[in-house]
Image (spheres, grey):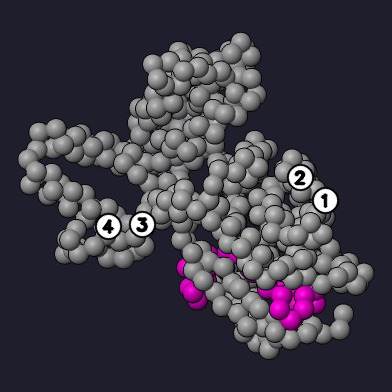
C-alpha cells in the first residue's frame, strides 16, 4: 500500500514478536521459505513446531506469524518441494524428493537462522534475552500465582507495553498510568481489529488470495491496499455507479481487481504501471479471475500515458485511484482533473505518511509531494476534498477523497 514499506522482503518474511507485535520480529526478517526447507530437511514437522524452532534458533530475533508461515508452506507445496498429510489430528509437513535435492544443493550455505544471528544488533539480542526472561516469569505466575497475583501481572504488562510504545513516539514515559485507566492503541491492536472485521465482513475469496500469493512469489513489494481498504474502493465505485475507472499504480493487481469487480459488464478500467514485471503479474491475476475483458493495463511512466489519453480525447472517468510515486501526486491530480467530469471521485492513497505530513521539518520527496497535492486541492474550486486517517494491518496512513463539482477545462 505505502512506498515506505516498498523495500521489505515480501509477505513471506513477516514475523511477529513473542507475545504479539507485527513486522520483522525483533529487528530481523529472514527468508521464510528457505528456512522451512532447511528445517524440514532435519525432520517432518507441524506448523507450530516450525514457528517454535525458528524462534528458538534465532534467540527470539525472528518469530514468523502463522499468517505468514502457512502461505509460504502452500507455495512450497505448489512448487512440489513440500508435501503434507494429516497426523494425530494435525497437518504434518515434509520435503519431497525435489525439496531434498534443492536443500542438498545448498548444504554449504549457512542456515537462514545463523545469518539472522550473525547480523543481529547487540541491542536486539539484549532485548530478546530480557523478553525471554519476562516470559519465563509470566509463565511461573500463570502456573503458580493466585488470582490477585495474576491480575497484578496483567496490569504490569499492560503498563510496560504502553510505555514501550510511547518510546517509539518519542513521548516521555512515566509510571503514572494504571491498566484501569485504559490502554494505548498499538499496531498489534490495529492488526487484530482489522482481522476481526475482515473475518466477519469479508468472505473467503480465492481470486484475491491468489493475487497476494502470486505477487509474493514474484517478489513484488508488499504495499497493496489492505482487504478492508480494497473493499472500500469497491463500495465507493459501486456507490457512484462508476462505468469507467482509472487507476495510477497497478502493482500485482490487488486493488485493480477490487475496482474492476465494481464495474458492470460493459464497464472499463484502465490501470497505469511503470514496471513491466508488475504489469505481467497483474495481467495474469486479472485473467485468472475472468476480468481481462474489462481491465486494461498500460505500461510506462504514468504522466506520459495520461498525456496520451488526454490528447486522444478518450472518454472521461467516473473514479480515479492514485496510488503511485508520491512525489508526482500533483501531476497526477492535474491530469485527473482533465480526465473526469462533475460527480467523479478522485482518491489518493498514502497521504498521512505515519503523521510525517504534519511535520514541517520533514522535506522528503514523498511528504512534500503529498503537501503539494493537498495545497492544490485546497486551491482548486472545482473539487471538494477531505482526508481520513487510517490505521490497521498496513500501519498508520490515510486517504484523500476529492469530489469533482465543476466541469474540467477544455483539453
Kindly identify which residue carries mark 3: 186
**238 to the left or right of 144:** right
Q: Are marks 3 and 2 in contact (CB under 8 Å)?
A: no
First in residue order: circle 4 vs circle 1: 4
Task: Tell me the quadrant of the picture where the N terminus can be found.
Answer: bottom right
- The part of the chain drawn in magenta is 332-361
Q: How many C-alpha atoms fall within 10 Å of the one at disc 1: few (<14), some, or many (≥20)?
A: some
Task: From the image, state whether disc 3 or disc 2 is nearer to you.
Answer: 2
First in residue order: circle 3 vs circle 1: 3
Kindly identify which residue carries mark 1: 293
**10 to the left or right of 50:** right
Task: Tell me the quadrant of the picture where the C terminus can be found.
Answer: bottom right
Q: Position of residue 91 (x, y in %)?
A: 46, 21
Q: How many C-alpha atoms fall within 10 Å of the one at disc 4: few (<14), some, or many (≥20)?
A: many
Q: Residue at x 72, y 56 (%)?
A: 260
Kindly identify which residue carries mark 4: 162
Q: Residue at x 16, y 64 (%)?
A: 176
Q: Secondary structure at mark 4?
A: helix
Cα distance, mark 4 to mark 3?
A: 8 Å
Cα distance, mark 3 to mark 2?
A: 39 Å
Image disc number at residue 290: 2
The answer to whether 141 is drawn above or below residue 104 in the figure is below
Q: Are marks 4 and 3 in contact (CB under 8 Å)?
A: no
| Quarter of the figure with residue 331 | bottom right
Cα distance, mark 3 to mark 1?
A: 42 Å
Task: From the image, state whether disc 4 or disc 1 is nearer to you.
Answer: 1
Cα distance, mark 4 to mark 1?
A: 51 Å
Amino acid at each position: 500500500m505505502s512506498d515506505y514499506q516498498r523495500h521489505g522482503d515480501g509477505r513471506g518474511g513477516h514475523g511477529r514478536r513473542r507475545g504479539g507485535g507485527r513486522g520483522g520480529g525483533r529487528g530481523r526478517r529472514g527468508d521464510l521459505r528457505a528456512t522451512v526447507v532447511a528445517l524440514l530437511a532435519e525432520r517432518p514437522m507441524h506448523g507450530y513446531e516450525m514457528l517454535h524452532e525458528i524462534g528458538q534458533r534465532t534467540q527470539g530475533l525472528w518469530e514468523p506469524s502463522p499468517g505468514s508461515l502457512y502461505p509460504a508452506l502452500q507455495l512450497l507445496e505448489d512448487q512440489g518441494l513440500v508435501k503434507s498429510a494429516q497426523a494425530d489430528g494435525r497437518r504434518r509437513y515434509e520435503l519431497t524428493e525435489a525439496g531434498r535435492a534443492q536443500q542438498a544443493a545448498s548444504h554449504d550455505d549457512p542456515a537462514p537462522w545463523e545469518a539472522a544471528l550473525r547480523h543481529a544488533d547487540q541491542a536486539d539480542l539484549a532485548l530478546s534475552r530480557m523478553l525471554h526472561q519476562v516470559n519465563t516469569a509470566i509463565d511461573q505466575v500463570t502456573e503458580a500465582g493466585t488470582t490477585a497475583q495474576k491480575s497484578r501481572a496483567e496490569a504490569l504488562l499492560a503498563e510496560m507495553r504502553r510505555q514501550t510504545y510511547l518510546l517509539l513516539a518519542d513521548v516521555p514515559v512515566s509510571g503514572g498510568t494504571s491498566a484501569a485507566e485504559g490502554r494505548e492503541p498499538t499496531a498489534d491492536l490495529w492488526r487484530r481489529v482489522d482481522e476481526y472485521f475482515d473475518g466477519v465482513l469479508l468472505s473467503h475469496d480465492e481470486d484475491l488470495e491468489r493475487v497476494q500469493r502470486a505477487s509474493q512469489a514474484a517478489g513484488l513489494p508488499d504495499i497493496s491496499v489492505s482487504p478492508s481498504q480494497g473493499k472500500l474502493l469497491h463500495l465507493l465505485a459501486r456507490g457512484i455507479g462508476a462505468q469507467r475507472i482509472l487507476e495510477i499504480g497497478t502493482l500485482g493487481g490487488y486493488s485493480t481487481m477490487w475496482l474492476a469487480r465494481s464495474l458492470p459488464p460493459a464497464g472499463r478500467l484502465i490501470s497505469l504501471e511503470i514496471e513491466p514485471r508488475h504489469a505481467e503479474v497483474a495481467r495474469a491475476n486479472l485473467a485468472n479471475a475472468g476480468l481481462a475483458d474489462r481491465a486494461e493495463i498500460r505500461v510506462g511512466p504514468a504522466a506520459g500515458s495520461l498525456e496520451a489519453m488526454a490528447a486522444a480525447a478518450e472518454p472521461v472517468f467516473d473514479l480515479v485511484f492514485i496510488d503511485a510515486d508520491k512525489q508526482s501526486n500533483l501531476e497526477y491530480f492535474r491530469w485527473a482533473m482533465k480526465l473526469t467530469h462533475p460527480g467523479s471521485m478522485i482518491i489518493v492513497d498514502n497521504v498521512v505518511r505515519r503523521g510525517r505530513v504534519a511535520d514541517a521539518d520533514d522535506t522528503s520527496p514523498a511528504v512534500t509531494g503529498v503537501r503539494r497535492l493537498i495545497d492544490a486541492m485546497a486551491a482548486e474550486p472545482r473539487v471538494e476534498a477531505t482526508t481520513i486517517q487510517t490505521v490497521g494491518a498496513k500501519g498508520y496512513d490515510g486517504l484523500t477523497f476529492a469530489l469533482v463539482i465543476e466541469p474540467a477545462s477544455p483539453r
